[in-house]
Each structure stands twice: as C-alpha cells, then as structure tokens.
Amino acid sequence: MSDSNDSDSQPDPYVDANRGDFQASQAQAAPFHIEYAARVHRLPPYLFGRINNTLYQKRRAGKDVIDLGMGNPSDPPERSVMEKMAEATFDERNHGYSKSNGLLNLRRELASKYFRKYGVRLDPDTEAIVCLGSKEGFSHMCLALMGPGDTAMIPAPYFPVHMYGVILAAGNVVALEVADSDKFLSNIAYTCQHFYPRPKLLIINYPHNPSSVTIEQDFLTEIVKLAKRYGFMVISDFAYSDVAFDGYTPPSFLASPGAIDVGVEFTTMSKGYNMAGWRVGFCAGNEAMIRGLATIKGYYDYGMFQAIQIAAIVALRDTEAAVERQSEIYQSRRNALVDGLRRIGWDIDPPKAGMFVWAKIPDQWMQRMNTMDFAMMLLEDGDVAVSPGSGFGPAGEGYLRMALVENESRLRQAVRQISRCLERQSQNYAASSGVESNSI
Ligand SMILES: Cc1ncc(COP(=O)(O)O)c(C=O)c1O
C-alpha cells in the first residue's frame, strides 16, 4: 500500500512529459559514459601505433614505403586451393553454420600430417580441433585454463598474445628470456621452485617470434620432464613449423615422449600455406585441454565457413611441395637481407627458421636513442617500416624485427635505404655536435 502511495506522490518520468524532457536535457548536458571492464584497463597502449600511423600517413601521401613490419605473407596460396575454395563456395550445402570444432576430414588431414612429418599419432576425434586462426584458439585456450590467481610462464621477448591472452583471462605472467635455451630451462625450474602458488602453464614458441630462436627435440623432452615434475601444463605455439631453412626441421613438442599428457600444440595455415586471411589454425594434443577449448568455442563461435575447411583439406593433402618451395623463397630472402645488413656493418645471426630477421641495432645508435625512436627514424627518413623489438617487451630493446615479406630486390633496396638514412642522420648529428660522422 505504502509503495503505491510513494509512487503516487512521485511523478513517473515515463508518463510525465515535462519531467521526461528535463531528464533528456540533463542527459544531453553530461556526456554518456562508457565504462570498460577492468580487463581492458589491464592492456597497455598499443606499442606499434606510432609506426602504423606514420606508415599510413606516408602511404596516403603516395610514398613507396618498404614494409617489413608485420609477418603478413604477401604470396598467394596454391591455385588448386583457391579453385577448390571457389568450387565449394558454389555448393549450396556449404553455407550454413558449421561445427565449432571443425570438419572431421580436416582434423583427419591434420592428424595424418602429424604422423607423416613427426611420427605423432593423434585421434582426430578427441585430440584435434580446428580454430579460426591459431591466435583465436590460443586466446580461448587461455580462457579455458587461466583465471584470477593463476600464473603462466611465457617467453621474453614475447609475441603479444602470449602475454595478453593470459592477461585477458585474468591470469598473471612471468616472462623468461629465450635467447639462451639452457638458461630458459633452468629459469623454469627456478620459477616453479620459488613461486607460490606454482605456475599453472608454460607457453613455448619455437621457432620463436620475434627472436627466431630455434631448438632441438631434446629441449622439448626436457620441457615435458619439467612439466611433470612441477605440475604445469604446456602450450606450444608452433606457428612457424612449416618455414625452415638449410635442411633444419623444427621439432614438434608433441613428438617428445609424454608430451600429450601435459600439453597441446597450435599450428596454422597462415604462414607456410600463405593463407593468413583465411583464418585456419589447429590445436592438437592433450584431450582434456582440447575439450576445455571446445567448451569455450562452443559458446563463442559457430565454426569456420565450410568452403574454407574443404579447401584447407586440399591444401594439407596436396600442396606439401608448395610449402617447401615457399620456405626456399623465405630462405633466399633471408640471405638477401642478412648479407645486405652485414655488408653495412650490422652483426646479424641468420635465422634457421621463421619469417623474421631479428637484427641487433648497432651499439653506436643505441647510445643515442631508444629502439622505438630508431625504428621511427628508419621509417620517417628511410621509408622502411620495421617492428621495434621493444614492442615485444623490454627483452626486445636494442633489436628490430624485420619480416621477410617483400621480394629479394625490395629487401636489397630496403638495406640501401637504411644505409643512406643512417649516413644522413650521422652527418646531421656530426654537424650539430661537432663529432666525426664516422663515429656514429
Ligand atoms: C608466434 C605466432 N603465433 C600465432 C600467430 C597467429 O597465427 P594465426 O594466423 O594462425 O592466428 C602468429 C602470427 O603472426 C605468430 O607469429
């Protein structure tokens, strides 16, 4: 009764036109505030923003910038794969929602590739799942495994989603340097012995992006032993499994004895198959971890366009030779870039795999400016875009990541432009400070 009296005594904003107008004018006076969730505030400012904006402005102004910034393949997939995609698109049965864990035949094709290449037996029903690109699968796997109070060990420097996939899942991160593999192993043991609660997850990524560090099977077998000893799960990001040089074959984590008890491995068709825009990735390995990912995906997505999955089956089954040829192309580009940079005096380790050269910036430049400013200088004055190593965390300071996504002659041209830019900048510096320009 008193409720109805109270409401009788107060004008109802929905029926009282005057009050309604008053509220509307109040709302106009104060801007509507959009409050993001706390997880968004845990993300840092986007570090490549400065580079990307300048690159965009230069291109809009008609400049020909050589872009070695992103590992975005510039070559097309095999023609037979594109034709299959076109054909499957015209099949009316392929346009509905698909299964969120992917077509069984695609998972079978993944399993047979694992057996052919690494001798690993997978049950395509329970130990393999298709993802909308491996990055999607990785992020959702973090959501399935990590929560408040959980810690993951990740490589440093880090591919951003290795850090922020965990952060977005409300977990915490310990970053361990990858440059020295023995030290990486001992740091894992040390972290497990000294952290409470112990880390729940280890993320590994070999061939590593951005540093191009590679390892052998023994190393992965040690990882499995450590995982069993300290009770952490493992996610192996094997994105560059198909891109390797000089006879090196990157080993699969799943080929180490007992790996499937403790972890999963992500692979992708983005790199070796030139299908980055298609968004085809896979997760294979531990059944319970795959089930966790499938549960999250079941709520979030309706699977991949079936025409893409059908064409991906053809790519996995029939185009292995093309994947090898693509590696040879990257190898020639690596040679062109590494030789060129060495000729202008840079100290570079040629990578054995992956799509990047991880180039140490000459010391004389690092004494004058930080990595981001150096990369900006190459872009602004040299028209060459690269990724500053510091964009991959503090362990990347002092390095540039250069993606092998332009052809050999453009890569040679990039080196010439870098060389001229550094000469000009040395002279400018010498003129303004009275120092010999060759000391820069
Ligand atoms: C280490 C690493 N993992 C994952 C990915 C993402 O691959 P995908 O295209 O399958 O999402 C990339 C792409 O650059 C990468 O470098």
Image: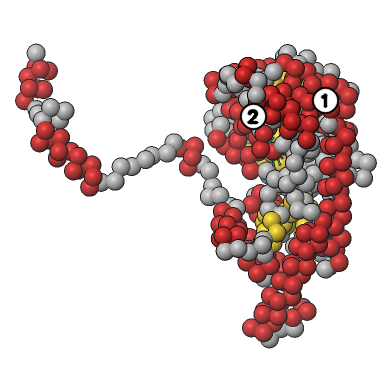
- At mark 2, the secondary structure is loop
Question: Quadrant of the rendered structure where residue 174 is?
Answer: top right
For discs 1 and 2, the disc positioned in front in the rendered view: 1
Decide: is 388 above or below 266.
below
Question: Quadrant of the rendered structure where residue 225 is?
Answer: top right
Q: Which residue is mark 2?
A: 132
Q: Residue at x 15, y 30 (%)?
A: 13
Decide: is 114 above or below 178.
above
Task: Specify whether residue 196 is in view.
Answer: no
Decide: is 98 above or below 60.
above
Q: Residue at x 63, y 16 (%)?
A: 93
Q: State the quadrant of the C terminus.
A: bottom right
Toward the viewer: 334 or 399? 334
Residue 409 as seen in the image, left or right of residue 129: right
Q: Where is ligand 1, by quadrant?
A: top right
Lower position in the chain sequence, tag 1 or tag 2: 2
Q: Residues within 10 Å of mark 2 (few under 14, many from 20)?
A: many
Identify which amino acid the numbered label 1 is placed on. Arg
- Indicate yes or no: mark 1 CB to ligand 1 under 8 Å: no
